[in-house]
Amino acid sequence: MGKVLIIGAGGVGRVVAHKCAQASDVFEDILLASHNLSKCEEVKGDILRRTGREIKVAGIDAENVQELANLIKTFKPNVVINVALPYQDLNIMDACLEAKANYLDTANYEPKNVAHFEYSWQWAYKDKFKEAGLIAVLGCGFDPGVSGIFSAYAQKHLFDEIECIDILDCNAGNNGHPFATNFNPEINIREVTQNVKYWENGEWKETPPILDPQSVHFTFDYPVAGPKESYLLYHEELESLAKNIKGLKRIRFWMTFSENYLTHLRVLQNVGMTRIDEINFEGKNIIPIKFLKALLPDPAKLGVNYTGKTVIGNVFKGKKDGKEKSVYIYNVCDHAEAYKETGGQAVSYTTAVPAMIGAMMIIKGLWKGEGVFNVEELDPDPFMEELNKRGLPWQEVEFKGKLPDGLVQ
Ligand code: NDP
């Protein structure tokens, strides 16, 4: 039916390639391209062993727009899935425009020299994609991604008006390492050490970062995983959902962190290992966070001994037919099962399956449009159906638990 080019053969890229290979009725031809060709070859061998399918591979520097545009022109994919790093988003969008290909990613653009992410850089491509008659889908992993799809579904089917959304992301897994990040360490640490923001009554409110003694957190009782300390964190989908979910009064994002994780991160931050500026070390310029990445476990290899589950979902509060209503929609994903199926752990898996489904929506013509879209602007129904079929089944329940009304510390 269609062809897909996947860029990035890391933790997420591996699982995207596996899931596309499994959906052979949709993805007839798959090209996996990344910095390091040997990583692509390794994934290709694994897919061949598990499914008997041959995929194509290529080495590429996605920051070289012309080189990438040439690769796209030669392969002619229906859609390019970008699961490299946020630094490459704009280069890959430029190459898609030049070579006339649809685009999809899982994380918004972030410049290398400032730890700051926002959608404005990519939203600025709206007209260019429109004029080219192409669709670019932004943030189609789990969060951002499914968190937006759940919101669109709740808006379409469950509520007349959604007042509050709380996105709750719990990793109750154990990877056996004293300290490891579940996706690219550099991107992850930049994200979680930032100042926290949430959106309320039409404005952004700031609270201290998760490492600060004044950080905002509370204990949420997750299905399957049980009670876990959950920290208020700024996450990119808050920006697009605050804009796209009409009538919304408040949106927040919470993520679980263990005391062990926070202690390690605090020490690393205090000694300067999370710095993103260059320092001179023995006559050579190095960036401490990049050096730290080289020392930490590769998230793509974490799956081997990973046990436990992720539980990620949204709590919606609002009104239907004049009555107050609260609904919780969530998914539970098992690290060991994800590893058995694809060689990736549950954080890679929960990111990759939605990316594959988003590409499927484009190839099947179920998501149509010209321009740049966040996932909540597209039809959630066929996507929700595929989540159930492709390894991320979801539950919808009445929410009877408690969430902080005022902010707790
Ligand atoms: P990894 O670091 O494991 O993988 C990134 C891959 O991109 C690596 O294979 C790397 O190659 C490749 N790459 C980096 N730079 C380039 C380049 N210039 N040209 C070509 N390839 C390049 O990261 P993850 O797989 O953990 O994460 C991938 C993406 O998914 C990130 O953007 C992350 O933010 C996002 N993500 C989204 C989530 C969501 O729910 N929405 C959740 C988790 C992650 P090499 O190693 O050879 O340098």
Image: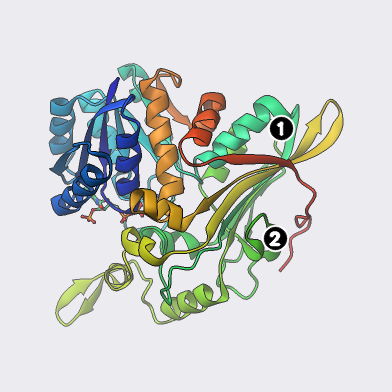
Q: SS of the residue at dot 1?
A: loop
Tell me where residue 255 appears, x and y as whole percent.
Answer: 58, 59
Badge 2 local density, few (<14 within 10 Å), some, or many (20+)? many
**Residue at the spot x=50%, y=54% of the render?**
334
Q: Quadrant of residue 286?
A: bottom left
* Residue type marked 1: Gly
Front tag of 2 and 1: 2
Give whichever of discs 2 and 1 has the lower sequence position.
2
Tell me where residue 365 appears, x and y as whole percent.
Answer: 41, 17
Badge 1 local density, few (<14 within 10 Å), some, or many (20+)? some
Q: Is the distance from the Cβ of mark 1 to the nearest ligand 1 atom less than 8 Å?
A: no
The residue at which mark 2 appears reads as 220
State the separation of the CA atoms marked 2 and 1: 26 Å
Residue projecting furthest to the right: 323
**Residue at the spot x=38%, y=55% of the render?**
339
**Residue at the spot x=70%, y=65% of the render?**
219
Front one among 179 and 89: 179
Q: Quick check: 177 left or right of 214?
A: left
Whether pointer 2 and pointer 1 mark residues with C-beta atoms closer than 8 Å, the reply is no
In the image, is residue 30 above or below residue 135? below
Q: Quick check: 86 left or right of 235?
A: left
The residue at which mark 1 appears reads as 247
Tell me where residue 364 appears, x and y as whole percent.
Answer: 39, 19
**Residue at the spot x=45%, y=36% of the render?**
390
In the image, is residue 169 above or below residue 70? below
* Quadrant (top left/top right/bottom left/bottom right) for the C terminus: bottom right
Residue 164 appears anywhere in the view: no
In the image, is residue 354 above or below residue 274? above
